[in-house]
Image (cartoon, grey):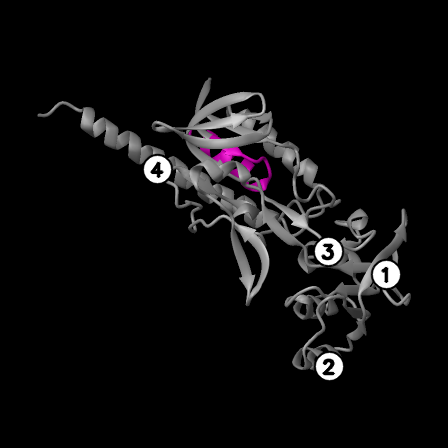
Amino acid sequence: MDSYDVVVVGAGAAGLNGALALVRSRRSVLVIDSGEPRNAPAGHVHNFLTRDGTPPGEIYAIGRQEVRRYGGRVEQGTVTAIRRDDERFRIDLADGSVTARRVLVATGVRDELPDVAGLAEHWGQDVVHCPYCHGWEVRDRRIGVLATGPMATHQALLFRQLSDRVTMLAHTAMPTAQERERLTARAISIVAGKVTQVEGGPAGLTGVRLADGERVEVDALVVASRPVARVDFLAPLGITPQPVRVGDYVVATAIEADRAGATAVPGVWAAGNVADPMAQVVSAAAAGLMAGAAINGDLVTEETDRAVRAAPVT
């Protein structure tokens, strides 16, 4: 059974940047990558200084090379469980196990999308959720906002900055009187009725169909996905994702961690979308760096304490 200072679960921006900080501190590191990044459907990463417009796969490929350059291992695999094994952690994989002194969880989230026919097929292209990730790419187009929760008006107002042709589709969440006033003030039209079909083809989105048969022409559709932390394998440690709420509405789930990524279980850190569902690639990378540095500092403290205890009494 191979043993490491740190096993990093997840090879997105957070996991790779955490691993990079650790291997540059001469730690033995294994990164386990399931090959399912959240932003795989997206063509490009944005708001990442010096990397704006780069395909996400290209960024991760460069990141893997950088980790390996300093002696780290990056391997394809799926973690099935993590549990205590005396003073270490045992990380069970589909085809074996490894152990580690510390664990960094950076597995990200899975986006739960509204159950509307045709929507998932356009996700990450012309069905989008974030004005900072995709807004420039849909500027000046006919933008529909699928209202499913309390953030719909906020989304519509943000996308109004990018186009003067924004329509609120009151799918399952009709705006309140106050919200309607704000939307109307910004010339955002409101269409009542449940959306049953997203229509389009290889060339892109063309519109949405309502339950009553009405068709609304849109070139892009804004939705609020529900990011769900991918951490079932942490159950043996007693770590479970917690709801992230806006009022009484659950908008996501996440692992609770402090600013440096430390969880309630000593020796386990979390970084990136798994701990902050709203983090973009650049902020996830920064969180991974912070967690990697914290893990190295924790190991240094442990090793120094052990050396002090072992030193001869003078």
Q: Which mark is residue 185?
A: 2
Q: Mark 3 Cα within 10 Å, few/some/many (few <14, many 20+)?
A: some
Of the pair 307 and 4, the residue shown nearer to us: 4
Q: Residue at x 85, y 65 (%)?
A: 211
Of the pair 235 and 10, the residue shown nearer to us: 235
In whole angstroms, how far apart are the C-alphas of marks 4 and 3?
42 Å
- Residue carrying label 4: 298
Q: State the SS at label 4.
A: helix
Q: Which residues are magenta?
A: 7-25
In whole angstroms, how far apart are the C-alphas of marks 3 and 2?
28 Å
Q: Residue at x 55, y 36 (%)?
A: 16
Mark 4 or mark 3: name the one nearer the start of the chain: 3
User: Which amino acid does the dot numbered 4 rest on?
Assistant: Asp
| Residue 2 is one of the magenta-drawn residues | no
- Residue carrying label 3: 114
- Residue carrying label 1: 208
Q: Mark 1 Cα within 10 Å, few/some/many (few <14, many 20+)?
A: many
Contact, mark 2 vs mark 4 (Cβ under 8 Å): no
Of the pair 234 and 158, the residue shown nearer to us: 234
Query: Percent position (x, y) of residue 304?
Result: 26, 31
Query: Percent position (x, y) of residue 222?
Result: 75, 60
User: Which amino acid does the dot numbered 2 rest on?
Assistant: Ala
In whole angstroms, how far apart are the C-alphas of marks 1 and 3?
14 Å
Contact, mark 1 vs mark 3 (Cβ under 8 Å): no
